[in-house]
Image (tube, rainbow, N blue to C red):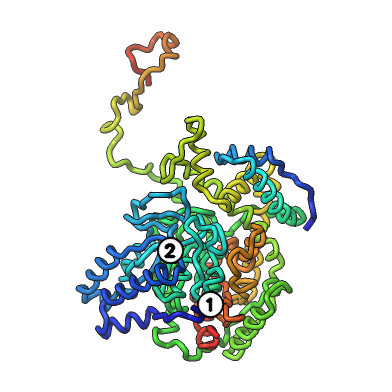
Amino acid sequence: MSARDTVVGVDEVRHVALLARIGLTDERALALTHDLNTILAHMEVLRGVDTRGVDEAAGVGAGGMRLRKDAGPPTPLAAPPSEFAPDMRGGFFIVPRLATHDGLDASASGEHSE
Amino acid sequence: MTGAPARTTVAQIISSMRAASRSPTDVTKAALARAREVDEEERLNVFLARADKSAMNAARDLDRDARARETAPLFGVPFAVKDNISVEGLQVSCGSRILDGYVAPYTATAVERLRDAGAVLVGKTNLDEFAMGSSTENSAFGPTKNPIRPSVVPGGSSGGSAAAVAAGVVPIALGSETGGSVRQPAAFCGVVGVKPTYGRVSRYGLVAFGSSLDQIGVFGITVSDAALALRCIAGRDELDATTADVPVPDYLGSHPEGSEGSAVSLKGLVIGRPKEYFPKELDPDIAKLCERALDRMRSLGAEVRDVSMPHTSLAIPVYYIVAPAEASSNLARFDGVRYGLRVPGDDAGLRGMYEATRSRGFGAEVTRRILLGTYVLSAGYYDAYYRKAMQVRSLIADDFRRIFSSGVHVLFTPTTPTTAFPFGARTEPYDMYLSDIFTCTANLAGVPAISLPIGRVGGLPAGGQFMAAHFDELRMFQAAFALEAALGPEAHA
């Protein structure tokens, strides 16, 4: 395992914490910077492994996630859409017209658009 | 307290009730009393919640069920469940403050199936927070003590379930495995622990940690106990798409109840002894116990073959990239909006609330792993860490495939490199991670594995591990039955 210099700085730890939505005190951010660098140093051994042509975790499961056939009708609903939609026309849901679209389509009439 | 507390196996409980000398109510009362004793008098901190009322109601129903008395495979047998598995109406804390006050609205399939088999749930057991740890020291509710010697850890993360079995509260318990969280505490507490093949047992109702690795596992006093419990919970479940539609054999078929102690032939069985699992860092006394076990199996007719699994040493780095990466995604849901704890932030905004809740709610190890996982998945690092780890994971799985297609039926290794260690002995995170060095390979490859007691070192239990090919739990159990019978009382001496 190769020794390496610190690669994760405290600012980077703060950035990752922001992504993970975890608030950190200054003290905790420093401690985690130390921990992450120590742990990641042990991961360096992977860099030396020849993985050319190796798939990512190919066949790790015993057959992997089974998918249903890409055929047949869509998953049935408990009730047809016309029963719970406020309004439908030609198989489409009718939704409130956006104010930003006003005047864009002279042919549209009424307060709804498809 | 030292040594092994009095324990009653599933077979002993069932035969006592079939003979009508005891009722399910009697057995349940005894288990609940022992559960109170281990926590209130012995202060082992095994249970996070007890289900006294529902347990007694279930037992009374069984008292009146003459048909179940004859047919239910776990009739009246008390069991415990790790507190990251959902049971409707009971808390599911995951050993974390962030789920404070959360009550499960539904029941895990594995628990349903044990109940359908006649078993009675007595309580939810302690664990490392979100199953991240190897000692239960990461529980927000304090560590569990090892019933064999309370000054050492019980292992983890399913330490509470292992301790419940070891302390004689229940003969079987459910735990969960992501990198060894059933087998390692089983080894530390001197009981049997099984990690089934990935896809063998439904994870519906298990709080997700590392979804490509997680499996519900079982603890038992004996191999028979664990095999029977697994037989009851295994099989396809429409509620978990990763469960496989593979027939579940009768694991006890070759080893009927009550045949404990009788010699079983292993003629024709080829056992692989992978040299990478016997490194110089291995406790020499554990190595000796493993060699004794291998000698016993040779004398039963097994062929022991030296084999090599060259990518084994890479398993810990791979595991501690893959599991935290998956955890960082799975645990994103705990944000103060939908579950448990909510802490208002300083700036009253939504982000402030998220950050305050997650900062206060998660403990140090969970925070560490979420940040590690977020880091290895983030732009610029994904290829160097996560993608690389998943490629090396393929190589580790290939090691297993190659060995099992070369005529080797099972592998035998130590379960852990040391016996249970004292509380506070491992303060550097990576030192703790090394506890999983012999177990996490089975999770990475998805194969089944079992740990069973093979003797003691300085009074503390040591575990031996069998691993088998995908869905070949039957052969794994046959080897374990034979070794257990061959060692007899020496397994606990």
As drawn, A20 above or below B114 = above
Which residue, as the protein is rendered here, is positioned at the far left? B64
Q: Quadrant of residue B174?
A: bottom left
* Residue at image point 28% right, 81% down: B17
Where on the picture, by quarter, is residue B15?
bottom left
Q: Earlier in the sequence, mark 2 or mark 1?
A: 2
- B455 or B74: which is nearer to us? B455
The residue shown at (39%, 59%) is B237
Residue drawn where x is 56% and y is 70% of the image: B152
Q: Which mark is residue B125?
A: 2
- Which kind of residue does numbered mark 2 sit on? Thr
Q: Residues within 10 Å of mark 1 (few under 14, many from 20)?
A: many
Spot occupied by residue B449 in the image (x, y as percentages of width and height): 54, 70
Which quarter of the rendering shows the C terminus of chain B? bottom right
Image x and y of residue A17, in percent = 60, 40
Residue B460's image quarter?
bottom right
The residue tagged 1 is B452
Amino acid under disc 1:
Leu
